[in-house]
Amino acid sequence: MDAGQSARIVAGTGKYLADVELPAGSLEVAFVRSPYAHASFGEVRVQGLAGRDLDLHPLRIEGPGLNPQPWRALPLDRARYAGEAVALAWGANRAAAEDAADAAEIEWEPLNPINLGDRLFETTFDSGGVDEAFAAAAHVFEERFAAARQTPLPLEPRGVIAWPRDGRVELWTSTQVPHLVRQYTARALGVEEAAIRVLVPQVGGGFGLKAHVFAEEIALAAAARATGQVLRWVEDRRENLLASAHAHDTAVKIRLAVAADGTFLAFDAQVSADVGAYSIHPFSASLEPATCAQTLFGQYAVGACRYRAVGFASSKCPVGAYRGVGMNAGVHATERMVDEVAAQLGIDPLELRRRNAHPQLPVTTAGGRALDSGDYLRLLETLREKAGYEGLLEEREAARRRGRWVGVGIGFFNEHSGTGSTDYKKRGITAVPGMDAARVQVTAAGRVVISTSAAEAGQGHADTHRLLAVRELGVLPEQVDVVEGDTDLAPYGSGTFASRGAVGVVEAVVRCLRAVAGADLAPGTDVTRTVDPTQVFPSGAHLAVAEVDPVTLVPRITRYVAVEDAGTVLHEQAADAQVRGGVAMGIGAVLLEEHVYSEDGQLLTATLLDYLVPLATDIPEIEVHHLHSPSPHTTLGSKGIGEAGTIGAFGAVANAVADAVRPQRGKLWKLPYSPKAIFEALEPGA
Amino acid sequence: MKVALAVNGSPWSGEVEPRLILADLLRDRLRLTGTHLGCEQGVCGACSVLIDGEAVRSCLVLAVQAEGHEVTTVEGLDPELGAAFLRRGAFQCGFCTPGFMVTAEGLRRAGRKPGRAELEDLLTGNICRCTGYSQIVESILECL
């Protein structure tokens, strides 16, 4: 991380969105939100502005498999989930703005909430040969798995400042995707992109949540243009849990054809995701179901596959990105299935993975994915050595003899990172540009200024980019400035998500730096490079040891080993920090996190006392090891590592807890693996 | 209502609405924005400050309740704690950091010398979403 920013963080002088100094007379906004899961409404009387006052253009995402229903940032006459913003109310401070929101008069007409509504997305895939493989199989296994509705929950909630200045609107927002916010806000307002400048202050975590274009950004920009007022909205945690973006809520049914020796021959899967009320911008309703389906058994040499993936609408908060997105549900289903097969066939789970992992890369999978590099057998072997696998199994047996419920679980996976425009279009997402860009300038004084289309939220981009400049140009770190998060200064690109930093962004930076080196760092040199990356596939193998208390049924992770292969590692400390943080998030997602709605569509988990995230006592020491199989698609051979920790944990943690309760004849399939889920799994007849 | 208190050693007094929370007084009136609001539900600990040396959540304390008390915010802490956090890379986004540092300072002033497991337990009033906690725990252990 940038040394100056780090020093400000510990001094308490960091400048997050809510810390930006505003001119006197600025107004604080509170949103009037729907109290109903589904309702029509008439006139809105509010000290502020409603949808009908702002004349916002509806946005729609078109593409293969997508139902292009329109989305208005503020609806005109119907709210489709509890918490949906319907109007802005304002006052001199937040309390006054909330008073104004409470005083808003709206004629609501409640409607029945929708549980399984329109198909907002649907796709199918068939490699051919599936029926033949099932006919020839010695065993056919069928299982179902479910990933809970969750939310990324960065510790800093969202926030927006809309500041009219010189005929434009400066839109400060805590976002991972500044150029996309500019693009879609301009479209919704019906103005040129040049009329909007998006600025990103210091961001207190994103994890995918802040990679969307939100109603609040568009509404504040429109209201600031309409009134000429500086407006600020700072989200509170209740709004964040209720109405930002949720994630997952995906059910997977798989049939797997297996040969007598345990070889996986083919799978046939149904993926069904509850994507909420709208197709979320920019990723669309395809994000979770398509990503999940594409991930299934991707690490294994399965000869044939078939799947159908559907995203259904419901009267719930829209589903979007959360570190790993559908790969988490996909790896959970795949890796839990492998362990169930191993248990039923009496084959050691590590051995079953060894028999079925892609023996050699590069390879194109039955699902059509071009895996670029990796050494999956060495990955599993390294995990075995580093974790001391056989010793752990002996310890588990000894503990079980003393009546303890101990389990060992493996999560083996690959994931795609750095998705480019071709792959987004293939997945039906046309609203994401897919390219990344960098610009490197040499100033008259000889300073090197690197600006990129990425947006920092704690990953440490500045440090990594500075390190690249030092290596490529031989300059001192103090000579390098890094600029991100300002659409006037940074080149156009996708932003920060899908672990694309080490792929497209770094590639663009390196190409610029090499061009600058070629120009001998002549002052005035100014190079911009745009990269449309080819998807690369990091891989990993994780192991967790879990113990479940036989009385309280509380699961705990007592040991964790992660072996990652993200190609060339650019900055080891930053990479390890991403893996550890990712694993911690995955432990929370597997054991604790769950959003729950009541039957009438009210969110029951709108506080941090109800929506549980991991605390210091929940996370063991996380050991991280790296293999380095460079990607042929990037100059330095790097691949993304932002999501690997979380994705691996969805396999390893889930399998460890499932293994701990297996001797009690409990079978876990639905996340989170909470004491309640374990209790239900242990019930006779469950 | 009128309220008078000391913040980081300096006296402050002024007129406040009875409903004003201490966090908003510190952030909006005194412009001490190192105290972060992560939930306003009393759970995440990002808004922790010391009142007479004891860590409290400033989102759950009314400004008027601090009448006559000594408040310490992250801006008023001994730089030694921050140096340990920097050295060990104990943050990524940094939003939770002030809360952890204030909690640590409260333990230090109480003369606590916990072992690692006990310290983890003492830190369950603060949430970090980025790091997985171990570097935070180690930074604080080093300073107690």
Image (cartoon, rainbow, N blue to C red):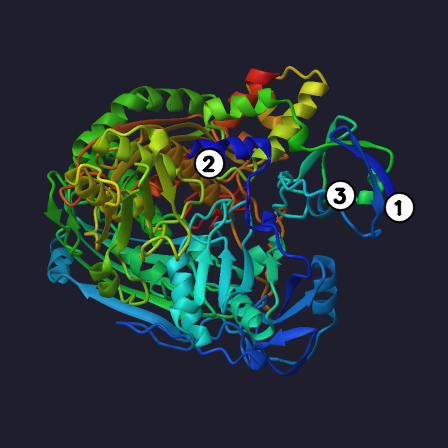
Q: Which residue is the site of mark 2?
A: B92
Which one is in front, A521 or B59? A521
Label 1: which secondary element: strand
Do pointers 3 and 1 mark residues of a single chain? Answer: yes
Real-space Cα distance between discs 1 and 2? 39 Å
Q: Which residue is the site of mark 3?
A: B22
Q: Which residue is the site of mark 1?
A: B2
Which amino acid type corresponds to the residue marked 3 in the rendered image? Leu
Which one is in front, A188 or A514? A514
Residue B7: where, in percent of width, then height?
A: 76, 33
Real-space Cα distance between discs 3 and 1? 13 Å
Categorize mark 3 by other alpha carbons within 10 Å: few (<14), some (14-19), many (20+). many
Q: Which quadrant holds the N terminus of chain A?
A: top left
Query: Given the image, what chain letter belongs to the residue carrying mark 3?
Result: B
Categorize mark 2 by other alpha carbons within 10 Å: few (<14), some (14-19), many (20+). many
Do pointers 3 and 2 mark residues of a single chain? Answer: yes
Q: Residue furthest bottom?
A: A42
Which one is in front, A217 or B139? A217
Which amino acid type corresponds to the residue marked 1 in the rendered image? Lys
Residue B39: where, in percent of width, then height?
A: 63, 47
Decide if residue A46 is on the left or right side of residue A302: right
Q: Earlier in the sequence, mark 3 or mark 1?
A: 1
Query: Given the image, what chain letter belongs to the residue carrying mark 1?
Result: B
Label 2: which secondary element: loop
Q: Earlier in the sequence, mark 1 or mark 2?
A: 1
Label 3: which secondary element: helix
Question: Where B66 falls versus A313 (above or below)?
Answer: above
Do pointers 1 and 2 mark residues of a single chain? Answer: yes
